[in-house]
Amino acid sequence: MSLAGGRGPEEVNPVPVRTVGGWVCGFSGAVSGAYLLRYAALMAMKPRTGAAQYLAKQQKDPEYRAAYEKARRRIDQVDAIVRSLDDRREALGLTKAELARGADLAPEAVRRLFSVESPNPTAITLAALADALDLDLVPTPRAKVVRTAGRSARGMPVALRQAP
């Protein structure tokens, strides 16, 4: 599911489409080159904390790494949707309390959703907020990504490219 108004291409590649009844947005699922470069640079950096060292050690296991990346993609999608809802709320000039009233939700739940670092809303909550903001939640297919293995000239992992 996705909404128009993502905050940056490093998170998602939003594809807004205007329809007669309001906004409908596709979520292309394409990952920008800048995001991949930052991700590769972060993965190549030496971990600084004990937790980061543990994670780096775990990431060497292909099964763990695949599960971690899958979970990370899901979290990023939820974050992008919540940020899109908040951007739309701000664009309409609504307060969080006004949005909560329009969505028939508790004001503290809406404040918390837009304030916490990793929100985990239910689909019903997202649908209620989208409805109050005159948006539709629309699942769209991802762009095909070709996975390749290798290293760049600087030794950075090169893992993804968008298929033609």
Image: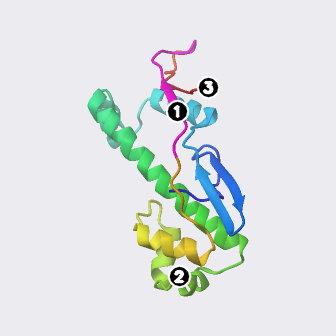
> Pointer 1: what residue?
144
Asked if one can make out residue 49 in the rendered structure from this viewpoint, the answer is no
Nearer the observer: mark 2 or 3; the answer is 3
Q: Is residue 26 magenta?
A: no
Res. 164 mark: 3
Q: Residue at x 65, y 72 (%)?
A: 89
Give the CA separation, mark 1 to mark 3. Answer: 8 Å
The amino acid marked with disc number 2 is: Ala
Res. 103 mark: 2
| Residue 140 x %, y % | 53, 49
Secondary structure, mark 1, is: loop
State the residue in front, 24 or 129.
24
Q: Please give the range of residues in magenta.
A: 141-154
Give the CA separation, mark 2 to mark 1. Answer: 35 Å
Residue 35 sits in quarter: top right
Work out which quarter of the rendered image holds the C terminus and state it.
top right
Dot 2 crowding, Cα within 10 Å, few <14, some 14–19, many 20+:
many
- In this picture the colour scheme is rainbow
Dot 3 crowding, Cα within 10 Å, few <14, some 14–19, many 20+:
few
- Return the disc, 2 or 1, that comes first in the chain's sequence: 2
Q: Main secondary structure of the magenta part?
A: loop
The amino acid marked with disc number 1 is: Lys
- Return the disc, 1 or 3, that comes first in the chain's sequence: 1
Total numbered labels placed on residues in the image: 3
Q: Residue at x 54, y 58 (%)?
A: 138
